[in-house]
Image: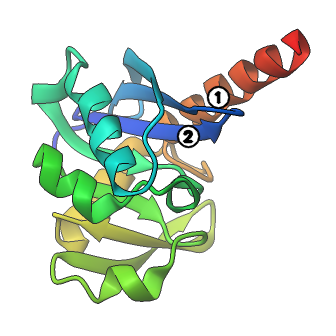
Amino acid sequence: MPKREIRILALNLAQTKYKLIVVGVVFRGNRWLDGIVSGLVEAKGQERTQEIARIVRRSRQFTQLHAIMLAENAADFDCHPTQLAKSLSVPVIMPSVQCSESSLIQEQSTVSFNFRLAGEDVSFVATGIGVEEAKEVLAVSTKPGSRKPEATRVAELLMRELKFTLNSED
């Protein structure tokens, strides 16, 4: 079992008219917000994942990250978990609800599994990490009874507020 305060980065993505907004939250387990990462990406396709990796590397906590959790919508924005994990040498975990699971599962280092959150089985895809360790990371990063890991929840809140602010400025 990993320590209760491992650093986990949750990334959330949103598209503006011309750029991709990246918002990340580093949490220590499910307890403390430890940092925020943000950036804008202009690249398209596979280059987009490399730009996201550059944003993550700028984080003060990058060398201490135990895992990265991608939002459900990451695949919609050409963020490939396998490429991100290889580029950063950090495991990546994401819900498999929105990603094209069939193409991910064919890759050798990618695994699919279910994890129970708030009494429901949720499907996940992980790369660069084994199933048992991925489940331990999810257990450490999720508050009892919660529907998602704490870092993911907070990253979604920040992105929602940012999108609201951007839309109200138009």
**Sooner in the amino-acid sequence: mark 2 or mark 1:** 2
Residue depicted at 28% across the width and 89% down the height: 106
Q: Give the quarter of the figure containing the N terminus.
A: bottom left
Residue depicted at 62% across the width and 35% down the height: 156
Q: How is the image coloured?
A: rainbow
Return the residue at label 2: 13
Placement of 102 over or under 76, stated as above or below: below
The label nearer to you, 2 versus 1, is 2
Residue located farthest toward the top when viewing the structure as drawn: 169
Residue depicted at 51% across the width and 69% down the height: 116
Q: Position of residue 37 (x, y in %)?
A: 39, 20
Label 2–label 1 contact, CB within 8 A? yes
Q: Give the quarter of the figure containing the C terminus.
A: top right
Quarter assignment of residue 164: top right
Placement of 64 over or under 140, stated as above or below: above
Return the residue at label 1: 159
Placement of 121 over or under 42, stated as above or below: below
Q: Amino acid at mark 1?
A: Met
Quarter assignment of residue 81: bottom left
